[in-house]
Amino acid sequence: MNYRHAFHAGNFADVHKHVVLLALLERLKQKPKPLFYLDTHAGRGSYDLRAEDAMRGGEWREGIARLAGRPLQSADLLRYVQATHAASAPPTHYPGSPLVALDALRDGDRAVLVEQQPAEAQALKQATQGRRDVSVVCGDGYAALKTYLPPRENRGLVLMDPPYEADSEFADAERALRLGLSRWPNGVFALWYPIKAGAQSQRLNAALQASGLRKLLRLELTVRPADSPIGLNGSGLVIANPPWKLDDELRAALAELHSALDGKGGSRVEWLVGE
Ligand SMILES: C[S@@+](CC[C@H](N)C(=O)[O-])C[C@H]1O[C@@H](n2cnc3c(N)ncnc32)[C@H](O)[C@@H]1O
């Protein structure tokens, strides 16, 4: 399978995911200790929104373009529009999760970016050339959990953003989160999942609730009724070991994001499993 994120870059799900990614890194940076960032499904790092794939998909018009130039209240949203260069006008390029994260990391922090498709990994190498303490690995992001965790910094974030092209990927993702936490119990993990018609995202949430894992926060944003047959109706993230007060702090930010995106669904922040 050959998933191409270029069709989707900058869509509402990217916006949701990257707002939360920056919010997590910002809170982790509140302590001076070096951080480790692992991106298991990194993509190519930067997407030209004027290129054919992005124009054909056009999904960024209902994502990042809706925030551009808009007055925003939340510090988490303001940080995101600055990071994506969308504060005053729609950007021509959209940064993928690796560049969003690398721009937020400090000297002394370290990142490993894993991408399976060779052409995407090569583009990612170019997009991150010259950056210190960054490794781009062409390989399997799930296998990387065994190779790189626990990190010597013992503080940081793992972003898991699989393409969910195969139905089995929901079960793979759930297993991977359990594996990652078994290797690094106090790491912060963010697992993204799509919300479409059908019960797969609910099944993933139910499996995580039954898994015995603790401290799992669910952040969902829907722009259509969750059972609409059109396609991607919503974006979900499960955060393991979220920073203190993230739930309260993101509730207002994600409600504001939802209203800026003009969606028909809603946003929710709730504990899937508490302490
Ligand atoms: C949803 S995209 C990632 C988008 C990126 N995280 C971002 O936010 O900009 C998923 C990516 O995972 C890659 N991929 C698919 N299976 C993989 C695997 N097992 N390990 C690593 N990368 C994989 C795909 O080639 C694709 O580039």
Image (cartoon, rainbow, N blue to C red):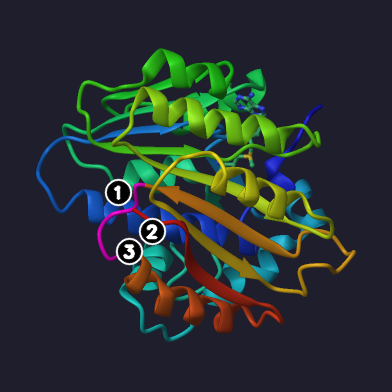
Going from N to C along the chain, the mark reached first, 3 or 2, is 2
**10 Å crowding of disc 3: few (<14), some (14-19), many (20+):** some
Farthest left residue in view:
32
- Residue highlighted by disc 1: 104
Front residue of 211 and 244: 211
Segment colored magenta: 241-245
Residues marked 2 and 1 touching at CB (< 8 Å): yes
Query: Picture coordinates of residue 120 (x, y %)?
Result: 62, 27
Splitting the image into 4 quarters, where does residue 229 fall? bottom right
Q: In which quadrant of this rendering is ligand 1 seen?
A: top right
Going from N to C along the chain, the mark reached first, 2 or 1, is 2
- State whether the magenta stretch is mostly helix, strand or loop: loop
Query: Picture coordinates of residue 170 (x, y %)?
Result: 70, 38
- Left or right: where 9 falls relative to 275: right
Residue 83 is labelled as 2
Q: Amino acid at mark 1?
A: Ala
Q: Amino acid at mark 2?
A: Ala
Going from N to C along the chain, the mark reached first, 3 or 1, is 1
Farthest right residue in view:
229
**10 Å crowding of disc 2: few (<14), some (14-19), many (20+):** many
Q: Is residue 139 above or below residue 252?
A: above
Q: Is residue 208 above or below residue 14?
A: above
